[in-house]
Image (spheres, rainbow, N blue to C red):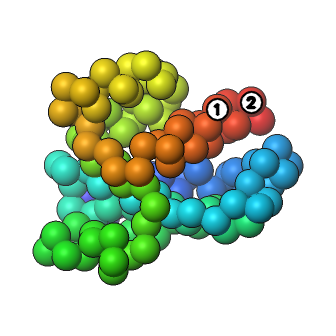
């Protein structure tokens, strides 16, 4: 599979760079969210930098590749590719995501950034 997880995340989220609403809302923001599909070989690092989003592919083995110290991420989300797809498609809303976190299906560090990630999906749907 040559199309990595990060490539599919890019296709979904990079159009935000064309969104006036996104640029306005995030013009003062700087943060990074690491999305790691535990059933994939690559993680995606979303960087929001003053109204611009970029996505970088990172091999998720060895585990040290994903360390907070190494990548400088603020939020971390780990689950199966299928659940990421459901979040991206808007099938899972905040409450559904929280249930999956509680049941251990989604692992989260920096939960306030998880809400930012969900917000990105909302902006995409509006545009």
Q: In which quarter of the image is residue 50?
A: bottom right
Lateral position of residue 15 relative to residue 28, left or right: left
Reading the image, the residue beneath label 1 is 122
Report the residue at 41% width, 51% height from top: 110
Q: Position of residue 47 (x, y in %)?
A: 55, 65
Q: Position of residue 35 (x, y in %)?
A: 37, 54
Residue 89 in the image: above or below residue 78: above
Report the residue at 33% width, 77% height from top: 69
Residue 27 in the image: above or below residue 103: below
| Mark 1 to mark 2 CA distance (whole Å) | 6 Å
Residue 36 in the image: above or below residue 54: above
Residue 87 or 10: which is nearer the viewer? 87
Reading the image, the residue beneath label 2 is 126
Q: Where is residue 125 in the image (x, y as percent from the top left)?
A: 67, 30
Quarter of the picture holding the C terminus: top right
Q: How crowded is mark 2: few (under 14 residues within 10 Å), some or many (20 or more)?
A: few
Q: Where is residue 78 in the image (x, y as percent from the top left)?
A: 28, 48
Q: Residue furthest bottom?
A: 70
Is there CB contact under 8 Å for labels 1 and 2? yes
Q: Residue 76 carries which label?
A: none
Report the residue at 30% width, 55% height from top: 36
Quarter of the picture holding the N terminus: bottom left
Residue 44 or 71: which is nearer the viewer? 71
Q: Residue furthest left?
A: 62
Q: Can residue 37 be seen in this view?
A: yes
Q: In which quarter of the image is residue 101?
A: top left
Lateral position of residue 59 relative to residue 121, left or right: left
Report the residue at 43% width, 66% height from top: 73
Q: Residues within 10 Å of mark 1 (few under 14, many from 20)?
A: some
């Amino acid at each position: 599979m040559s199309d990595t997880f990060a490539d599919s995340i890019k296709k979904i989220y990079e159009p935000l760079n064309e969104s006036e609403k996104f640029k306005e809302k995030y013009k003062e923001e700087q943060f990074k969210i690491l999305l790691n599909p535990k059933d994939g070989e690559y993680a995606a690092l979303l960087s929001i930098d003053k109204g611009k989003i970029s996505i970088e592919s990172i091999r998720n083995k060895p585990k040290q590749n994903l360390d907070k110290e190494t990548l400088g991420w603020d939020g971390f989300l780990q689950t199966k590719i299928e659940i990421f797809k459901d979040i991206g498609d808007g099938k899972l809303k905040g409450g559904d995501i929280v249930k999956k976190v509680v049941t251990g299906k989604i692992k989260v560090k920096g939960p306030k950034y998880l809400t930012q990630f969900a917000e990105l999906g909302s902006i995409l749907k509006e545009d």
